Amino acid sequence: MPPNRTRRGAAPPSSSRKRKATDDATEEKKEARPQKARKRSTSSTNMNQTEISTESADKLEKPILINRSPVLELWGACVASFLHPDMSWNACINIGSSIATLTAIAKGRSIGKIAEPDPDKQAERKKKGKGDEGLPIIRVMGFPMTMKGDAVVFKGKERTAREANLVRKFGEENLGKVKTTMGKALESWRGDEGELDKSAFHMYERFRPQVPKGQQGWGRKGELHLSKIEGAVRKS
């Protein structure tokens, strides 16, 4: 009989330990649940912040609707001013305008919008051009520009442009924004002007307004984004 009492007496402590272990495990689970919930909440917040921060900047800004020619004209002027700070802004605009015209002519001929040059007229211009020998020639974006004062000698004639034309096409406020964006981004190339000159036209091709290819896009307007200018020009 004593052995039986001993076994019955030993049972309660075992049962108590099991209940205690179960209660402890339950408490641990309860304590763990809020932590998991907090982790999920923090993770969700981080994901939302990442989505906002990585959202394309050009979707958050209001694009400027404009065709390509004035954009290239302004870009050429800004590049000329950066590469040749001793030149007047009027001279830089004349250079930008000439670059835009040369590019438009080449594009127009490639898609059949502009006729090929007359050989006789070309020969005549070359004869007239002999009188321009000795004038300074500078290169901007790979284009050689013969300068006569602030004017560019273009096809044997002095070519001048006015900033007022850019104001009319951009709008005064937008012109200021684009010019400032280009100028600030160009500053990142200080000390590496030679490489900038080689890359400047390719930069333009990256940020220029997107229009349909070929004749469908001739003279059409597209969206110009300041963020694309910044991304294409600023040196990494």
Image (cartoon, grey):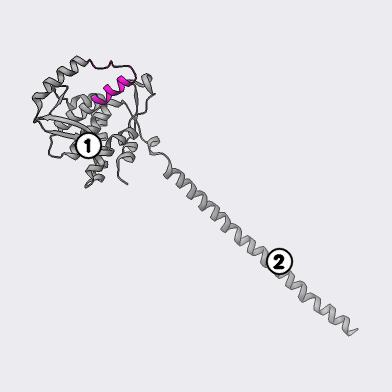
Residue type at mark 1 is Val
Residue 36, x across and y down, in percent: 58, 56
Percent position of residue 168, x then y: 23, 24
Of the two numbered discs 1 and 2 on the same chain, state the one appearing first in sequence.
Answer: 2
Closer to the camera in the image, 188 or 148: 148
Q: Which mark is residue 22?
A: 2
Q: Is residue 64 magenta?
A: no
| Region of the chain picked out in magenta, as a range | 102-118
Secondary-structure class at tag 1: helix
Separation of marks 1 and 2 at Cα, in angstroms: 76 Å
The one nearer the camera, 121 or 8, is: 121
Q: Position of residue 87 (x, y in %)?
A: 13, 36
Q: Element at badge 2?
A: helix
Rate crowding at label 2 as few (under 14), some (14 to 19) or many (20 or more) other CA atoms within 10 Å: few
Question: In this figure, which residue is indicated by the disc labeled 1?
Answer: 79
What residue appears at the point 41 percent right and 39 percent down from the top-left corner? 56
Apparent side of residue 43 relative to residue 111 in the rendered image (left or right): right
Query: Residue 105 colored magenta?
Result: yes
The answer to which quarter of the image holds residue 158 is: top left
* Name of the residue lying farthest toward the right: 1
Give the tally of numbered discs: 2
